[in-house]
Amino acid sequence: MAPYGSVALYLCVALAAALLFTVLPGLLAKPKPNAHKDEAYECGVEPTSSVSGRFPVRFYLIAMLFVVFDVEAASFYPWAVQMHALRMFGLLEMAVFVVVLGIGYAYVWKKGGFSWR
Amino acid sequence: MIANPTTQVDWNGIAPIITIAVTALVVPFADLFARTHAKRWVAILIGGLGTLLAAGLCAQQYGSTGTVFGGAFALGGFTVVFEEIVLLALFGSLLLFATTMQERRVGGSVALMLWSACGALLMAGASNLMTVFLGIELLSLALYCLCGMNDRPASRESALKYLVLSSTASGFMLLGMALLFGASGSVALSSLTLGGLATSSFLWSGSALFFVGLAFKMSLAPFHAWSPDVYEGAPMPVTAFMSVATKAATLAVLARFLYAALPTGMSSAFLLPIWILAGLSMLVGNLGMLAQTDLKRLLAYSGVAQAGYLLVALAGTTALGLRYAIYYLVAYAIMNLGAFSVAAALSDEKEAGSALSAYHALASRRPYLAAMMSLFLLALAGLPPTAGFLGKILLLSTGVATGYWWLAVLLILGTAISLFAYAKIIRAMYARPDGKAQPELPVAPWPAMISIALYGIALVVMTFYPLTPSNIVPFVR
């Protein structure tokens, strides 16, 4: 248990700091709301539109598809570094990985996931 | 230089899982090229064949022992039995796609269900914490998507609820696993068995959080609140799969933990909270059933209670108790699949068979389906001549023999309460038609009808030939 004492201390400090920063301002500061304070902050420029704008749901689709290929690239990297050590086994593993991904790619493509309707 | 990893790989050990995974890749691919009106049956056929092949490969491993992948996956009878139960649930649920769900979504749904089954199969043999978590997440991630595979708003609600609540439970479980790792210094379940760990506060707190995660997945009260809502919103094949495969796979993890991965000399107070949860589930589940107007919600509460019954058999952690639990689990799988099959046979894409009002005077319109539904409900209630009856007798006997008589009392009490809820449906099915115009009933294809008959026959036959596998004590090394 002893080696974890510092972890416990860290947790306590983190909790105390978080509480301090969120509770103290409410106790000390006097709230003086006005319309300008409620505006979105755009580096001092007059805000031109509402902050929570609307955008099409297809952005989410693109974002999700992007994540898939992003993760793919991230998985390739460690394999590429250790390619000689992993030899044929690593190559085959990566081939399987690419085939699995390729089937997903083909599925999305054929279903029209990449077309910007 | 890294040691050649191929020497540690035993592909035979996970051949069933690989088979299901490959099938899961073939199904969406075939779906792309199948003709529009053939998509549904192409997906069901390929999925079904893959499942049968996996079941065959799995059965061949019954006698094998030891672990593969550096202790990550244990072979042996225990793993095989739970894998076969998951595959049974998978096969039965795939058949339900024949009547429910829109044609264009069947291919993707079948593929996701196969992936989900992969996770459940992994859990059946998981012998280190990483594999347990990998299995649970693979099972759950696919299920989140599957729950939303319907156009009803309730379906989306169910997917979101399941995602948020289940992720929270996974968080608890991960923290528990981290603490268990802190206790033993290894992710292998076998490293927890050291006697010195029996009093470790990390082991106690870690196990507590680990059990919270498992209790959520198994929908034990008081962690059951998600299941009625999620079951109701999810498409019918998904609900059927979820109610059997998730419970079976989680029970496998729990049983392996209780039987093989506890430190020697552990006090029995350590496990008491689990049995209290079991008792609570029997009460909450059966009482919750009384007020339901939707079959899927009713079966969700029923599932809460059945999970409690199953744990009664494990209470003494005897090998015999585990055999009885497996017997009851198989019976539960069959009667649940049966009830869902009848509901699916009364449904099209809109799933009208999910509302209990659809069963009013069913006997005069579909006598065969009404009779089979009565059989499945009687089995769920635990009446003879069904496997539900014998299963409950076995659970009671092991509960009493191991000294957990208070669980046995709760089991009897719960059964008495549940009888009212099940009998209400049967009475409605055999009521006289009230003259009001009823919506037209769909005609289910013959494979659905045959599968319902097979479930019924299996339930009766299992009563007279109560076979339980003998080679089922789990191990972790």
Image: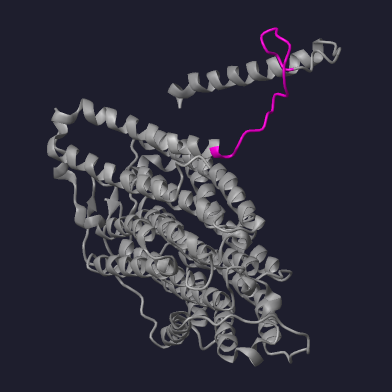
Is residue B25 highlighted in magenta? no
Where B475 sits versus B424, above or below? above
| Vertical order, A100 against B49 (above or below) | above
* Image-based side of B190 in relation to B288, left or right: left
Q: Position of residue B115 (x, y in %)?
A: 39, 55
Rendered location of residue A70, percent (x, y): 39, 32
Magenta segment includes A48: yes
Residue visible at 56% across and 42% down? Answer: B168
Residue at left offset 65%, top offset 73%: B413
Q: Percent from the top left, x then y, of residue B437?
A: 75, 84
Magenta region's main secondary structure?
loop
Looking at the rendering, in which quadrant would you find the N terminus of chain B?
A: top left
B464 left or right of B336 in image: left
Residue B216 visible? The answer is: yes
Residue B361 quadrant: bottom right
Query: Magenta residues, as a range?
Result: A40-58
On screen, residue A111 versus residue B288, left or right, reads: left
User: Which of these two is toward me, B16 or B304?
Assistant: B16
Question: How many numbered discs sit on the rendered protein?
Answer: 0
> What residue do we see at 17% from left, 30% from top?
A83
Indicate the colouring scheme.
one colour
**In the image, is A34 to the left or to the right of B53?**
right
Quadrant of the rendered image containing residue B225: bottom right
Q: Relative to the observer, which residue lies in front, B446 or B62?
A: B446
Q: Is residue B305 above or below residue B360?
A: above
Judge whether residue B322 can be spotted in this image.
no
On the image, the x and y values in percent for residue B178 come to 44, 36
> Does B357 sit above or below residue B302?
below
| Outermost residue toward the front in this view | A117
> Which is more toward the observer, B253 or B455?
B455
